[in-house]
Amino acid sequence: MNEQFLHYIWKLRKFDLNGVYHATNGRIRVISVGVHNHDAGPDFFNAKIEIDGQLWAGNVEIHVNASDWYVHGHEKDHNYQNVILHVVWEDDVVVYSYDGRIIPVLVMKPLIGFVTLSNYEKLIKTQKQFINCETRIHEIDHFLWGRWLERLFFTRLQSKSAFIEGCLQQNGNDWEATLFRVLMRNFGFAINADSFESVATAVNHRVIRKMQNDYTAFESFLFGMTGLLEGEYSDSYFRDLKKLFRFQQRKYGLSSGAVIAPKFHRLRPLNFPTIRLSQIAHLYSKEVHLFSKIMDSNTKEAFYELFDVVAGPYWDTHYTFDKPSPKKSKKRTSKAFIDLIIINTVIPLKFKYAQYAGASFDEDLIGLMEALLPEKNSIIVKFTQLGVKVPNAFRSQSLLQLYTEYCRKNKCLQCEVGNKLINE
């Protein structure tokens, strides 16, 4: 038996509802199960329980075994002195409170329906390849599935906008500085996200504003701050950038001590930090007021045009300094890459800005997400192999939230799909 399952049963009153139960201290009637507490202390606050005709108001603690009360040391904790009922699966010992009184015990084992318990055990004990409900997910009706995925999308969006909120608090509500930080992080992907972001946080954004209009100066700054101009090469372009960065260091008092060095290992050449940083330099040199441009744009096509940038001419024949590549090619941002920038930068930023402006949520943002292709990763591939339709980025973002916050953590009891399957 799992304690979280007992929480679920108690919270939703999934036990036998005849109304009166026999416990160790008399006849019990549950008036209110209380408020679920997810922090330290008793599991449910402010419950109302009638014991032998007397109404009690207080807290409820839930355990698999009554003896867990002592395992957790609750008898020594004054935070548990207001517990009026101990809900357990196995009543294996008499329980005393902090002040020495015997706490009434309600045994749940005979009160839970066979079907509910059987469905739960089937779901949790499945030898899964991917997710617990993979053999039954097709049983969920479209209305419940669609409603749940929409909630998951907005939960994920709120989480991303919370990061933006933190950035705004740190930089004095400077939206341009916040955009630069978020954009740098997302240009770095998972491997270099922290590295790129550390550049944005290491320098006052006023300094960045003074350089961003000049592609070469900004590229020099980005390469220098990330340590990519360390060492000595005969390459004239490298030497020119290094000389320029030394000048910038003296002029602006730049220090890269807090900047995390970027990585090249396990990256495709087009995602090398040299290429992505050069593309950012190009983006900012062509768009002086990038934040305003993003706020004024609403279509996929507009963002494809806005973020369509190429690394500088030097990178037509290089991926790293002093190592010419055999084939000449423009290092341009792809539509798939821009889709990720829209998903992880544009949408959360516009969502948070609308909140700050006191505006209602713009349905165009959902339309924009539905116009984008879904991400391509192992999680989405596995969902499609189960027969789950993933037509767009709105759906793929919802599924990523479902997997990372529920499936991977075995939180079937908190999931709408799991709830439905357990109660059928």
Image: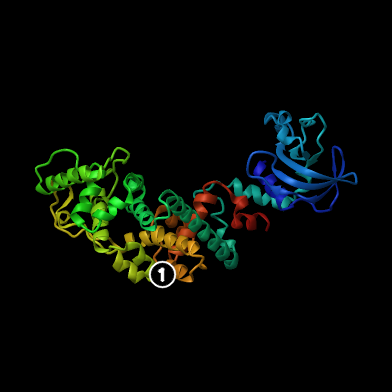
The N terminus lies in which quarter of the figure?
Answer: top right
Q: Nearer the viewer, residue 406 or 383?
A: 406
User: How many residues crowd around disc 1 within 10 Å: few (fewer than 14), some, or many (20 or more)?
Assistant: some
| Amino acid carrying mark 1 in the image | Ala
Q: Does residue 74 appear in the picture of this structure?
A: yes
Question: 151 left or right of 50?
Answer: left
Q: Position of residue 68 (x, y in %)?
A: 70, 32
Q: How many numbered badges does the structure rendering display? A: 1
Q: Secondary structure at mark 1?
A: helix
Q: Nearer the viewer, residue 135 or 255?
A: 255
Question: 229 left or right of 390?
Answer: left
Q: How did the renderer colour the structure?
A: rainbow
The quarter of the picture where residue 139 lies is: bottom right
The quarter of the picture where residue 108 lies is: top right
Question: 258 left or right of 98?
Answer: left
Q: Nearer the viewer, residue 119 or 196?
A: 196
Q: Nearer the viewer, residue 140 or 171?
A: 171
The C terminus lies in which quarter of the figure?
Answer: bottom right
Q: Position of residue 279 (x, y in %)?
A: 25, 57
Q: Position of residue 59 (x, y in %)?
A: 75, 42
Q: Residue furthest right?
A: 53
Residue occupied by mark 1: 371
